[in-house]
Image (cartoon, coloured by chain):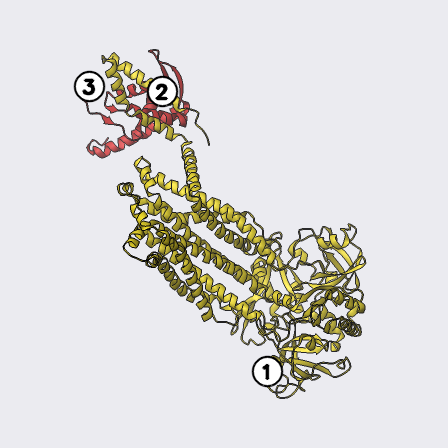
Chain colours: A red, B yellow
Amino acid sequence: MSTQETRERLELLQGTLDLLILRTLIFGSQHGQGIARAIQQTSEEELLVEHGALYPALQRLEERGWISAKWGTSSNNRKARFYTLTAVGRRQLVKETAKWKRLATAIGRILDPAKGD
Amino acid sequence: MLRRKRKPSDFSAEIEAHLGHETERLREQGLSEQEARAAARRSFGNVMKVEERFYESGRWLWWDHLRQDLRFGLRMLARNSGFTVTVVLTLALSIGANTAIFSLVNALILKSLPYSHPDRMSTIYTRITGSRPSDERHKLNGEQWELLRDNVPSLIPAVSSPRTSGVNLQAGSRVEYVLAGRISAHFLDVLAVQPVLGRNFLEDEDRPHGPKAAILSYSLWRNAFGANPKIVGQAVSLKGEPYEVIGVLPEDATTPLNADLYVALQPGRGGEGGGTNFECITRLRDGATWLEADAEINRAWQMRNQRYELENNPGAQVTYHSVPLQRGETARLRPQVLTLMLAAGFILLIACANLAGLTLVRVMRRTSEVATRLSLGASRWQIQKQFWIENLLLALVGGVVGLGVGFAALRGLLLLLPEHFLPVARVPLDGRVLGFALTVSLLTSVLFGMLPALASRNVDLRSSMASRAVAWGGSLRLRQGLIAGEVALTVVLLAASGLLIRTLVHLETLPPGFNPNGVMTAKASLDDVRFHDPAAFRKLLVESTAAMRQILGVQQAAAGLSLPYERTLITGGLAIGDGREAGQKAMADEVYITPDYFAALQIPILAGRSFSEADGPDTQRVAIVNQVFARKFFHGANAVGRYLDKDTMIVGIAGNVAMAPGIDPVAPLTNEETMYVPAAQIEARQLSLLHVWFQPSWIVRASGPVDGLTAQMQRALASADANLPFSGFYSMRDLLAKTLVTQRLEVALLSAMTALALLLSAVGIFALIANIVAQKTREIGIRLALGSSIRQAMMHIGAPGVRASALGLIVGLILCAGVLRAMHSVLYGIGVYDAPTLASVVLALGLVTLLATTLPTLRIARIDPAKTLREE
């Protein structure tokens, strides 16, 4: 068995999945499974993304117009639905990232006041 | 409904693709095909749940659910057709009653008057403080009018005659009796009514003795003049004189008078203007404010010479203020209409209580259905939603049917009303009424749905799945409470309508003071230049009454200015001429009569003599007064031979006769101080004015039915004057009905609503008992098997209904103690706490309760103990 089950992984905070999806798509269009893999790998397997949760989130982002989707063929010649960041989504990503960073800094200050950066 | 473009199958395909990718990746890591597929599924989570979430996030979902709930609701309602019909009927009747009454409220109180900028129209109220305070619309005298016209620049003021009077109009070869309204120059400007042809009255035409001009209503122009487009400028023969037609009003134009035609009022300080005889309406000029207008009115009217308001009211403060015309015009009917609305509200509450009881039972019966649905995974919210949707469906169906019932009821009601009874031209079923009906329907559904919804919240899965039995105790209490509540409201309505019925009976059986049987009367207009001459007037009366006496079967014929039950001319400025009371001012109803008036109506002469042909224009001026007059001004001493105003001798005392009140309105019919004078002694200057205000009546007494009496009366009149039409023929019963029309209407409407309330209460009690019988069949079976008699079982089962009703009766009587006092002012001849009325209320309610509890328990007699015990 792989290491996946032995390491304790972090569950995603409410609302962060959207941000991660948008961030992942900045490198180009990707299908759902690819996005899930990318999140897991980039976070060095720290984050637990239940794959099933990904699709309603993708659907939501698509309905908001932040990403667009198109059926295509993946590298290993399978059919897959590919998602691409839209201009609106890109702007949203910048905004959400800034917000997230401020939040993380603020929480960091409270949890570790000695550092005082 | 915006449907999303993506189909669920597309979403599933994507998930399938994901699982494929993941499986392949894991296989590349060295897992077997089977292991890889399982791991991919595991890391994905619940596929079905994800697909469901996709489906539910779609915007069509609630619509789907609603359609499903609606379909299910309709099926449930169709299956319980008895329940559905009961509920819809109850709703239809109560919403119908409310809609009909609300239409009246809407037309009379809420809707703007049908004029342009009605918010700028007003009338003037007089507020008097002091020992006898009041705040009401007064009529104006000539002095007030002139001051108002000349010194109040903020307003366009106008005056009119308070009511229309009959006049003779020559149309072609025929003379017709039509109703004329007399209006001042700017009256139509205040109403913002512009003629379709011609123009409004000029100020010059409105001066006393100004040119004679007339404006026709659209219908008269069409009916009497064939819609002649060249009518303006032509002369028509009106009141025996040529009047120039100067205008025709638009087809839909209404005025407070709603006359057939209008002539200029020509108000002045003298004559008619000497008393308060003008009705006033005003319109605020652009740029002016009501405050300015009121200040100007007060300034103008404080400088009057004659301040009649202060007479008999020393130390009083008098101020004037503008009141919206809407309120001024409807003040008379406002309390009645609001009372009816309150009664209609009661009906609605009663209906709600009934429906709450019915739906409660229904929900209880469906406990096992609810439990089943819950155990199959339905959420409590879904169950609640289902109930609410069913209630809403019922309310909407009931509302729509109710609107139909209301429309029909309103049509019927308006047919009952005499013409021009309402100060508005139409009572429309407009958007506001529709909105009201809809709101009431929704409100009702919330009211009657709330209880059962609450009750169904605590369905216990395990116990209700296990048995078909229904949780009782709490719900029975609740239903008894509901019934007590509705019975209490019914008691209040019963008592109120009982009191009104007793009032009406009192008024209708009031000793009239004359013999109304076998009397036929008819009016004619003598507001005609031919009869301004006293000699011509006398000749007409003598010849016409003589001709009527010739009719076979006619015993007596007479004429008089007014009849019993009617309003009369009021004479102020009388003074007692001699004796201890000399100089004392007196006010009385004055009626001119021909000598046979008392004989024709069979009014008794109690002392002295009646008039005779000998009482002519050149002989001693004489009068006959009634008992009330004699008692009030002569304190029981013999009035015969005494003098009024130095020159008029009282020659007789007549019995009291019921009249419409004028001097001091305390009741719709009253015995007022009355003075009769011979028609032959009326002076010329009085004659014309009297006949502007009043159209005298001819009275014929016949021994039995006379064939073609009315035609013969018309012929008899024609023999004296060929161009004098009667307005119509009335028996004394017609006149009584006309006088009491408000009371009759009130009684009819309130009684109808009370009957409805009683019916609903009976249905409520009936349903409660019927339900208990159905629920307790088994228990009754056991009781019967154990030796209880059917009677005992019936009493046992019926008792909760009787108890609820008795409680309601007590609460209702307590409510009556407070509520009925408000009716004080509309009751005549009986007290507010009228023992016979209250006794009838208790009796009626007792009977209804007995019926409603006994009928459903009759079924007990058919219960076979052996059979019921074998069931279950």
Q: Amino acid at mark 2?
A: Glu
**Residue B246 spot, x, y in % from top left:** 76, 56
Q: To which residue does mark 3 refer? A: A3
Q: Is residue B270 visible?
A: no
Left or right: B110 in relation to B482 = right
Residue most extreme to the bottom:
B579
Image depth: mark 1 or mark 3 in front: 1
| Mark nearer the N terminus (2 vs 1) | 2
The answer to whether tags 2 and 1 share a subunit is yes
Q: Secondary structure at mark 2?
A: helix
Q: To which residue does mark 2 refer? A: B14
Category of crowding for the residue at label 2, using alpha-carbon neighbours closer than 10 angstroms: few (below 14), some (14–19), many (at least 20): many
Residue drawn 41% across the image and 52% down it: B354
Residue most extreme to the left:
A6
Q: To which residue does mark 1 refer? A: B631
Residue drawn 27% across the image and 17% down it: B37
- B853, A54: nearer the viewer: B853
